[in-house]
Image: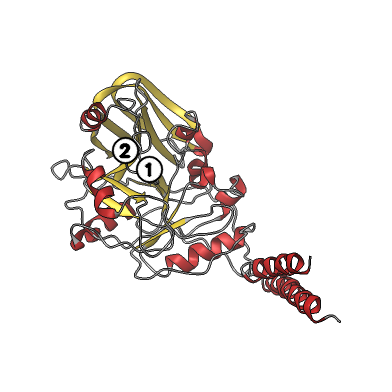
Amino acid sequence: MKSLAALLLAVIAGLAAFSVSPIYRFEGPVPFSGDKIYSPYADFDSATGWKRACLHTHTRVDKGINECPYYPDEVYSDYMSYGYDILGFSNHQALTPHPIDSSLYIGVYEHGYNLFKFHLNPFGVSSVEKFDHILPVLRSQKQMMIDRLAADGDFVQLNHPDRTHTIDSRTMQSLSGYRLIEGDSGFEEWDHGSGTALRHWDEALSAGRYVHNNINDDNHDSKNHFAIARRCSWINTPSPRWDDIRGQLLKGNFYTTRVPDFGHGDTAVKRAANLSLPRILDIGLRTDTVYMRLSAPAALIKVTSQNGRTVDSVTNSTSVEYVMTDEDPYVRMTAWYGDGTTVYTNAFARYSEGSSPYREFPHPVRWGMTVLWNLMLLAVASASIFGIISLFWKK
């Protein structure tokens, strides 16, 4: 009984130690506004075309947390066979060298070993951040990790908010400092299509947090026919090298696709279908008119604006045009196909200053609450340690 009690107290002490955080004051929703409209596709070059990418997938590693049975060279080969050009190895708490060509290396990993699955992908980093909150129940804890990781590299992606415990609309309206979000982040199709609504992304956009939707497989088994080549991004980049990719991701000069499990186990059928997916042929902004043209007619194209509201739609069409009104802080477009293929664009948004709607929202430290929170953690940890000592030193 003593040993069990000591273990419990040690766990409590550890949880307290890995919960330290500033407590911030968050700025609430500030919808986009202004007489300018930002187009993420202002630099779209049809001659360059799109390169298919998955920037969140797992492999076997010799040092780190293994969540995939196959080493990077095999995973890379599997993805290339489905028509991919770019693959980012985002293993948990481990940077993974590129197995084929070091010039294609992307400095990315998946950060987070907490119990709530609050995971972030920091891009352009050279080392792994070892600290994490075991129970990130507070918005301030989440913001602290975003800030800490963003300072280490180029930018941060918020992973799978649909599958992260303690993520709600208030959280999405408060957090800032990340540049990408996995809006459609279900595993395979276990979400029964609900992920196509991109609810959490709209919550962030509606609050004035300008981020781009970058969906990925988050694959843990590249031989699993049902799991590979299901979510991808198409980046308008001249090469698959990070120096070229980075700028296009920050601009939003890419779109994303949810892909059905073609063939239902027949790999040849699946590969052939993946090589002939519908694509965006042209996209952009003319004055205040957003437009898109597709390579094949979609069953439905919807234009979404503030709070996820549908403001326009067309059926059985290869194109759509929409004039942004003063009531549209932002708009984005989604094209649905009868076989389940779904194409998402990034958001066109209003702004008045700077070069884009992206803002670094202030979140000043509430010093009184910070002191109280961390003193409470210190008291819990100290009491637990004292309890352990008492158990074994008691006569």
Tell me the residue at 48%/35% (across/down).
195
Asked if the residue at tag 2 contacts the one at tag 1, i.e. Cβ–Cβ closer than 8 Å, the answer is yes
Element carrying mark 2: loop
Q: Is residue 18 above or below residue 299?
A: below
Tell me the residue at 25%/59% (across/down).
98
For label 1, the residue is: 217
State how many labels appear.
2
Is residue 145 something that shows in the picture? yes
Q: Is residue 363 above or below residue 117?
A: below
Q: Position of residue 120 (x, y in %)?
A: 46, 57
Element carrying mark 1: loop
Q: Position of residue 305 (x, y in %)?
A: 46, 36
Q: Is residue 203 above or below residue 209?
A: above
The residue lying furthest to the top in this view is 316
Tell me the residue at 46%/50% (across/down).
159
Q: Is residue 393 left or right of residue 283?
A: right
Q: Is residue 27 left or right of residue 211?
A: right
For label 2, the residue is: 229
